């Protein structure tokens, strides 16, 4: 909008310039604060130059004596604004503001005069000489009084500099404008209402000046009017009557009270002095005095309640105004009787220490209480603090007994600080107290308590004798001998779990826990008496008893579960071979293999087997069986074919130990193959054993005949724990008979075990004892072989494969307790039941060998594992169930 207005003005000015050209001078007009680049006029055209002539003749501007704010465009010959134009800076208050410029034109050289008028815009607000003006007006000034004010100034000219004034609203002041001449207006402040300094001491007003521009601009000045005081107010006391109560025992110099009078005036008119003008009774002159400046009334003499009970004084307050003004108040002093004798408490008898098992009502001390005052001041009330466990009982006037009200516990509080307090009935009441120290003597009423009810200790086997296993600690809060604890292993509550692999069914006998471990009687250090053997003992559970030295002695027990961690200290041992049947694809041609143990020893043995030429790949020829007395990974076995290396005709299952054909056999393989097989466990470091297998290659008929003759010749060896493998064709008839017999036997034994186990659930239980058990079952499958310990009933047979499975945990078997004479007419111990269950499990383990899929490593836990892909093999007939 502003640019369009400027363009219209410029067009008008161009016409004026053309008109003035005839007189030899060009005139232009431009408003101040025009933007740089604004066209002031077409100078070349106004000078009568043709297009392009201004640039050819070098039309330029010369501004003598000052910096030019305009310039000539060389291309168009127009006069342009080049920098900020400020009319107030160029011309001040002069009007009009005209700039004289010279324009040069060459070829031929000519000089033109250009007059540029800068017009005013409203760009300056009114300004007062100061932002704040202070005025002092007397409180007694009459309405209508006038106070001239200094007006504002405006740097603009014309209508933009014409000012008007307004005053902020006030009920005491108004504004009057006086014209000093046609242009200047002088404002005056007029008092319209009487002033009261005590109500409003300072008035704050705002004077505003507004110019006549569009839009208008304003300036403000703050007027601070201070009202000067006049002595028009008398002093006033904050109370007309001061009532004071003072004890008769008050000392001279005691502050009785302080009177206070205030004057609403200020300065010297508000300064107040005090004086006593009247005493009643007249003797009061010797009792009090007043400070004339502060108004403090002090006690100057002794007062006695029995002589004068009340004093009356008249106090006068006078200001320092002219004339002075005054006011009065009354002071009433009441003398109060005091209770100046405190009660006295005396201990006449004290019986300490008090046993912590003392009965309620036991008298601990006798006390006497008195007060020399009389009446209410001499009536005494007594009590004991803290309120428990002691109390006071009044025996007769002034005598009390300190008795036991609650049971004592020295372990909780060993000593009491008792305070007997007495208070009289005076006002204010006086109190007295007497402190008593009551120690509590100890009795043996706390048994030692272990930090843990059950301690779980892990120890590796083959530890050194005397090695520290753990530290036990029991706390007895009693003191001296009652709190001195000694430790011992209690054989009456122990349990031993574990057994030696390969031990006989008769076991090694019951052994007390004290034969394995011992505990230091003073420190509670648990240490081993002998090296521990995991194969003999896996878990040792016993109790440690802590007994104090009190009378009678008290004791506490803690159960210690010592778990022996297995070390790989046993190498795999080869087992005598057992009979097995091998089939290949269900075809009629089945090659039977018979294996016999030729050598003895823990390191290696010689095994024999027969195979028929033409046997297909995968035909099982023999099976290497081994057992490791260790547990877990230390007993997990793998089988490796050591010799011959390379691509031989045979291979060995990594974890099953089955020797099978790697390809079809032919006559080029020779009449006999000698295989060296290494059996290793997974322990660190690994231990191993070697076996030599000699495989004879025969015709199919000769191999069947050799298998039959081997079966008859090794029947005796089989009965003495030597394994025999029978051909499928030769043993097919016997298989069904052994299978039915085995199933019936196992079912009967299982039902018997269930019945006996159910009966044992309701029979009285003897102490749970566990001793090494005898039976060992070897589990072999596609993923390995390891030992099964009947003494724990928690081994697991596994095999490859993926199928669903469930897992059920069984309780461990319990071996018989230590031998003890059996009393007559007593209920029999359940040892026979435990032996029967163990025998049942032993017989089942002797009859069957089970393998389960989807298990990678042996786990020593008691389980029943069921899987659709699992299989059990009868140990007698080698039939897969």
Image (spheres, rainbow, N blue to C red):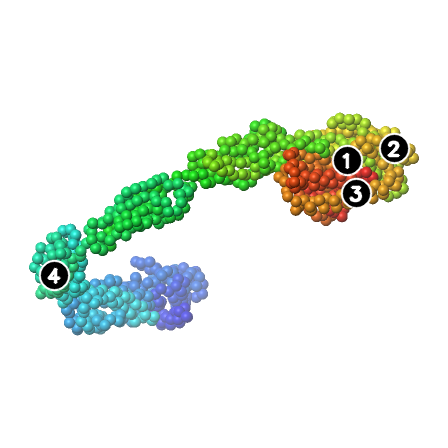
Q: CA distance from mark 1 to mark 4?
A: 126 Å
Q: Nearer the viewer, mark 3 or mark 4?
A: 3
Q: CA distance from mark 2 to mark 4?
A: 145 Å
Q: Is residue 658 visible?
A: yes
Q: CA distance from mark 2 to mark 1?
A: 25 Å
Q: Is residue 88 left or right of residue 637?
A: left
Label 2 neighbour load within 10 Å: few <14, some 14-19, many 20+: few
Name the residue tied to disc 2. Answer: 712
Q: Nearer the viewer, mark 2 or mark 4?
A: 2
Q: Secondary structure at mark 1?
A: loop
Label 3 neighbour load within 10 Å: few <14, some 14-19, many 20+: some
Q: Earlier in the sequence, mark 2 or mark 4?
A: 4
Q: CA distance from mark 1 to mark 3?
A: 29 Å
Q: CA distance from mark 2 to mark 3?
A: 26 Å
Q: Nearer the viewer, mark 1 or mark 3?
A: 3
Residue 657 image label? 1
Q: Secondary structure at mark 3?
A: helix
Q: CA distance from mark 3 to mark 4?
A: 126 Å
Q: Nearer the viewer, residue 528 or 79?
A: 528
Q: Is residue 664 visible?
A: no
Classify residue 672 by image quadrant: top right
Name the residue tied to disc 4. Answer: 313
List the single residue furthest toward the right.
701
Name the residue tied to disc 3. Answer: 745
Q: Nearer the viewer, residue 583 or 11?
A: 583
């Amino acid at each position: 909008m502003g640019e369009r207005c400027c363009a219209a003005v410029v067009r008008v000015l161009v016409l004026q310039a053309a008109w003035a050209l005839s007189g030899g001078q060009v005139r232009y007009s431009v408003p101040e604060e025009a933007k740089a680049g604004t066209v002031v006029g077409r100078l070349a055209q106004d000078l009568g130059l043709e297009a392009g002539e201004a640039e050819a003749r070098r039309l330029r501007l010369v501004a003598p004596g000052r910096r030019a704010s305009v310039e000539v465009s060389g291309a168009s010959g127009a006069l342009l604004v080049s920098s900020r134009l400020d009319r107030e800076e160029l011309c001040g208050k002069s009007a009009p503001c005209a700039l004289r410029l010279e324009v040069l034109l060459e070829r031929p050289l000519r000089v033109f005069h250009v007059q540029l008028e800068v017009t005013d815009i409203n760009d300056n607000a009114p300004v007062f000489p100061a932002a704040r003006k202070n005025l002092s007006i007397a409180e007694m000034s009459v309405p209508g009084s006038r106070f001239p004010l200094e007006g504002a100034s405006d740097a603009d000219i014309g209508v933009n500099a014409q000012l008007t004034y307004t005053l902020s609203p006030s009920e005491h002041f108004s504004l009057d404008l006086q014209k000093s001449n046609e242009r200047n207006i002088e404002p005056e402040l007029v008092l319209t209402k009487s002033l009261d300094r005590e109500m409003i001491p300072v008035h704050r007003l705002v004077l505003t000046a507004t110019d006549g521009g569009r839009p208008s601009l304003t300036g403000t000045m703050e007027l601070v009017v201070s009202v000067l005081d006049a002595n028009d107010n008398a002093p006033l006391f904050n109370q007309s009557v001061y009532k004071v109560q003072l004890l008769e025992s008050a000392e001279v110099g005691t502050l009785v009270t302080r009177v206070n009078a205030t004057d609403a005036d200020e300065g010297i008119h508000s300064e107040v002095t005090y004086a006593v003008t009247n005493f009643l009774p007249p003797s009061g002159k010797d009792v009090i005095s007043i400070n004339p400046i502060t108004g403090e009334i002090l006690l100057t003499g002794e007062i006695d309640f029995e002589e004068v009970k009340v004093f009356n004084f008249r106090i006068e307050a006078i200001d320092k105004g002219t004339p002075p003004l005054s006011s009065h108040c009354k002071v009433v002093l009441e003398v109060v009787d005091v209770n100046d004798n405190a009660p006295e408490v005396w201990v006449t008898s004290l019986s300490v220490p008090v046993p912590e098992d003392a009965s309620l009502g036991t008298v601990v001390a006798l006390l006497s209480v008195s007060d020399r005052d009389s009446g209410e001041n001499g009536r005494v009330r007594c009590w004991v603090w803290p309120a428990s466990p002691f109390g006071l009982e009044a025996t007769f006037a002034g005598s009390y007994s300190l008795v036991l009200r609650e049971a004592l516990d020295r372990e909780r509080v060993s000593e009491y600080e008792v305070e007997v307090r007495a208070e009289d009935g005076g006002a204010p009441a006086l109190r007295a107290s007497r402190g008593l120290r009551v120690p509590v003597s100890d009795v043996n009423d706390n048994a030692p308590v272990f930090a843990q009810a059950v301690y779980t200790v892990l120890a590796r086997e083959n530890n050194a004798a005397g090695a520290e296993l753990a530290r036990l600690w029991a706390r007895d809060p009693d003191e001296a001998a009652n709190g001195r604890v000694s430790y011992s292993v209690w054989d009456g509550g122990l349990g031993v779990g574990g057994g030696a692999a390969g031990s006989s069914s008769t076991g090694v006998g019951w052994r007390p826990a004290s034969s394995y471990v011992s505990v230091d009687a003073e420190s509670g250090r648990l240490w081993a008496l002998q090296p521990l053997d995991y194969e003999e003992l896996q878990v040792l559970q016993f109790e440690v008893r802590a007994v104090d030295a009190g009378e009678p002695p008290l004791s506490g027990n803690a159960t210690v579960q010592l778990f022996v961690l297995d070390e790989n200290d046993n190498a795999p041992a080869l087992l005598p071979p057992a009979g097995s049947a091998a089939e290949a694809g269900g075809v009629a041609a089945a090659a039977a293999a018979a294996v016999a143990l030729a050598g003895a020893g823990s390191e290696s043995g010689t095994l024999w087997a027969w195979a028929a030429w033409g046997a297909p790949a995968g035909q099982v020829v023999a099976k290497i069986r081994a057992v490791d007395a260790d547990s877990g990974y230390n007993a997990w076995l793998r089988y490796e074919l050591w010799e011959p290396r390379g691509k031989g005709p045979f291979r060995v299952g990594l974890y099953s130990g089955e020797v099978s054909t790697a390809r079809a056999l032919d006559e080029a393989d020779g009449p006999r193959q000698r295989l060296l097989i290494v059996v290793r466990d997974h322990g660190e470091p690994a231990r191993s054993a070697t076996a030599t297998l000699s495989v004879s290659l025969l015709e199919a008929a000769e191999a069947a005949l050799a298998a039959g003759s081997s079966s008859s010749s090794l029947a005796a060896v089989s009965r003495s724990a030597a394994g025999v493998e029978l051909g499928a064709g030769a043993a097919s008839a016997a298989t069904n008979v052994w299978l039915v017999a085995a199933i019936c036997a196992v079912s009967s034994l299982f039902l018997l075990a269930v019945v006996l186990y159910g009966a044992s659930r309701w029979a009285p239980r003897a102490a749970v004892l566990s001793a090494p058990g005898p039976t060992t079952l070897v589990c072999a499958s596609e993923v390995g072989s390891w030992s099964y310990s009947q003494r724990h009933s928690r081994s697991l047979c596994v095999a490859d494969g993926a199928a669903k499975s469930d897992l059920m945990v069984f309780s461990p078997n319990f071996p018989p307790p230590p031998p003890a004479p059996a009393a007559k007419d007593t209920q029999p111990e359940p040892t026979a039941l435990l032996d029967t269950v163990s025998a049942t499990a032993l017989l089942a383990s002797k009859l069957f060998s089970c393998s389960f899929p989807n298990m990678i490593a042996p786990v020593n836990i008691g389980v029943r594992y069921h899987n659709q892909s699992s299989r059990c093999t009868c140990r007698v007939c080698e039939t897969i169930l």
